[in-house]
Image: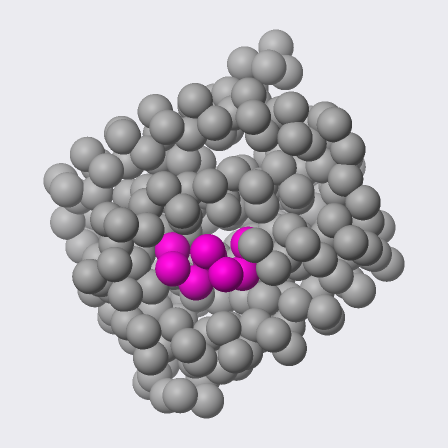
Amino acid sequence: MELFIFIFIILVASILQTSTGFGFSILATPFLLLLFKPMEAIQINLILSLFISVALLTKIKEDIDYGILKRFIIGSTVGLPIGIMVFLFLDVKNLILGIGLIILGLTLLLLLKFRITQTKGKDITIGGLSGMLTSSIGMPGPPLLLYFSGTDTEKAKLRGTTLAFYLFIYFMSLLIQVIFTGTNKTIWLSSLFAIPVVFIGLFLGQLLFKVINQNFFRIFTNIILLFTGIYMLIEGWK
């Protein structure tokens, strides 16, 4: 049963990541935490997310905003070491609860049509927050999604820039996680087993990306975030 759940999580999360640019970690991390130890769940997420980013790089090169990407990377170099300290000292229940609160807070702001003016300073700040969340819980997406949605960024640019940033942030976070917390056979065997499922998700996600419009994209995003956030809150309070 757990194997089936694992495959389902990876497949759905891969489809979302490919079609939206942010869905894998937001959907996968909370549910992987229910199947694996925190270190294992986060490192499996980082490995598979890194694999997806590499696989999609050639498809999204033309959609990347390189100026924003550079500022995200600069900001993340500050956030990464803060995030690993959070992970090392935070209880797993508080970790799950914190993820739920972050996701629900993000969803509320999106539903209220939160708007923000993009600046170079805000790019760096968002990169820092994303770096902190990646090395702590393996989830860089929430601040990026809120920022891009708040600035009404076109879906192709959102997907391209976030996936390119993930290539850097996931690699650095995985490296930091392994150095500070170690790793084990379960992480790498589970990741290897999941790669064929990821390939299927990549294919289906590319098809979905071509047919969804901007309005449906926003609605779908909010539904996924709302469901995941509520589920994590319930698990965190148990």
Question: Does the image show residue 29?
Answer: yes
Q: Residue at x 20, y 61 (%)?
A: 62
Q: Is residue 98 above or below residue 190?
A: below
Looking at the image, which residue is at 27% across and 29% down? 204
114 up-or-down from 142: above or below: below
Where is residue 231 drawn, in percent x and y? 59, 39
When the figure is inspected, residue 210 is found, relative to residue 204, above or below; the finding is: below
**Furthest-top residue in this view:** 1
Q: Quadrant of residue 212?
A: top left
The magenta span reads 163-170
Q: Is residue 100 left or right of residue 125?
A: right
- The answer to which quarter of the image holds residue 182 is top right
Q: Is residue 105 left or right of residue 43?
A: left
Quadrant in the picture for the N terminus: top right
**Residue beneath the point at 38% across and 55% down:** 163
Q: Identify which residue is drawn at 67% across, 37% down.
A: 41
> Which SS does the magenta portion mostly show?
helix
Q: Nearer the viewer, residue 141 or 185?
A: 185
Side of 92 where 155 appears, left or right? left
Q: Is residue 134 visible?
A: no
The foreground one among 35 and 218 is 35
- Closest to the observer: 225 or 37? 37
Check the picture and name the quadrant holding the C terminus.
Answer: top right
Q: How many marks?
A: 0
Residue 148, how many percent across, how many down?
A: 34, 68
Scheme of image coloration? one colour
